[in-house]
Image (cartoon, helix red, strand yellow):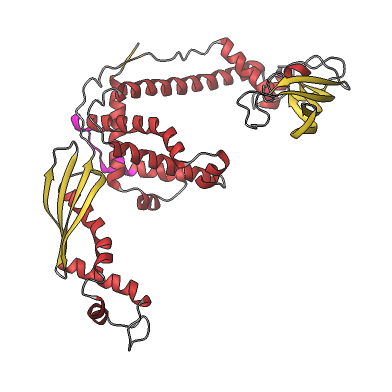
Amino acid sequence: MSLINSTKLDEANKYELEVKVDKETFAAATIKAYKKQVKNINIPGFRKGKAPKHIIERMYGKGVFYDDAIEDTYPSALADATVEAELKPVSVDDLSVGEVSEDGYTFKAKVTVAPELTVDGYKGIEVEKLSTEVTDELVEEELQAVRERNGRMVTVEDRAAENGDTTVIDFEGFVDGEAFEGGKSENYNLRLGDGNFIPGFEEAIVGHKTGEEFTIDVTFPEDYNAENLAGKEAQFKIKLHEIKAKELPEVDDEFVKDVSEKDTLEEYKEELKEKVAKRLEEQADKDFDDKLTEALEKLAVDEIPEAMYDNEVRDMLNEFDMRLRSQGMDLATYMKYTGMDQGAIEATYKPQAEKRVKIRLVLEAIGRQEKIEVTDEDVEKEYEKLADAYKAKVDEVKTYISKEALSEDIKVEKAMQLVRDNAKVK
């Protein structure tokens, strides 16, 4: 297989390649096609699946196996040709096969390639970094969060229900005096103030006491998911069985011993201070990177093939499907439950896909312009990190991720680090 010619077309980022598949390669492919098809071919005088190749070709024509052989050989031939032409195609837009014979065949393919951007202004980007100061108020908030997590629910007997309480209720809903499907439940636990029910429902329970029976009036939202109830006025009969409130523990040394390995409140506050500091640093770093990437995205001013965005959307969709499968679901089931089709899901991914592609192209350009190099040691270290992350052996990871692909990823990350190092913090 060999590249005959590579021609730059007038269209942006488009090339036409002319490729030759040689006699030996094509002959091997026709034999492969014969072995695949022969079991389904009946020839008089031969048992089914036992007819020699030349007999089948005599009966059905010399080219009987050519289509399968072309289908088998052109992808690798095109891949080799793009490497030889030093192109990185993102899509094949047109493919036409020339004359085919036992000596092989030629084909032409129009390919769209990733643009090689030239960018400027990536050094000295001004970014305001979030504060990482650990105040007493933040430490106190963290302490109160721990206290909330360790609270216990107790039954309230001596007061009316308040926001934040969990009530145990029976309810039955009516529209125009008729009970409706799904509008009834018994011993239902409802936390007041969370806004999980119809607007006005939880608010109407506030102020009532255990044992009370009462009726509340609400109106279903216009966009309610049950069309027969949307916008309708309804009445709910309520019986309030129990009111439960969260009782928080006292914050003292004994509490500290229960929730940590520290002995005193002051020691625990120091531990929380370190925890808050780490969280603030991580948030500040992420926000810093987000602002940098927003600035980098704006540097991608060249024309970018739509196919690159489509490919990225497809990759994101595949990632989503894999996540769903890890949770015991798949994309088809997800679409059935949500009522979304694949086109709608892809549309939600499109803006993020465009952002990813632009930033990647800009960072690749920075890598070229700065002549960033990736060593074998860099690659091996990255393989080891990935193996550790996926709890796999390094050799296994290498079967899934090529050295070339990993080197490109490392170069992009080094380019991003260069941008970080040269940024100006406001």
Q: Point out residue 335 in the picture as x, y percentages from the top left corner.
A: 52, 42
The answer to which of 270 and 219 lies nearer the viewer is 219
163 on left or right of 213: left
Q: Residue furthest right?
A: 211
* Residue 309 visible somewhere in the drawing: yes
Q: Point out residue 305 in the picture as x, y percentages from the top left corner.
A: 26, 36
Residue 348, relative to residue 192: is it above or below?
below
Tell me, yes or no, whether the highlighted magenta stretch contains residue 377. Answer: yes
* Residue 241 visible somewhere in the drawing: no
Q: Residue furthest front?
A: 176
Who's the residue at 38% across and 13% down the image? 128
Tell me, yes or no, whether the highlighted magenta stretch contains residue 375. Answer: yes
Q: Point out residue 411 in the picture as x, y percentages from the top left corner.
A: 27, 35
Residues drawn in magenta: 367-380
The answer to which of 44 and 203 lies nearer the viewer is 44
Quadrant holding the C terminus:
top left
Q: Point out residue 314 in the picture as x, y percentages from the top left corner.
A: 39, 42
Quarter-of-image position of residue 121: top left
Quadrant holding the N terminus:
bottom left
Who's the residue at 26% across and 29% down the image? 362
Quarter-of-image position of residue 60: bottom left
Please tell me how many numbered marks the rendered image carries: 0
324 on left or right of 404: right
93 on left or right of 281: left
Who's the residue at 66% across and 23% down the image? 231
43 on left or right of 166: left
The answer to which of 188 and 148 lies nearer the viewer is 188
Quarter-of-image position of residue 150: top right
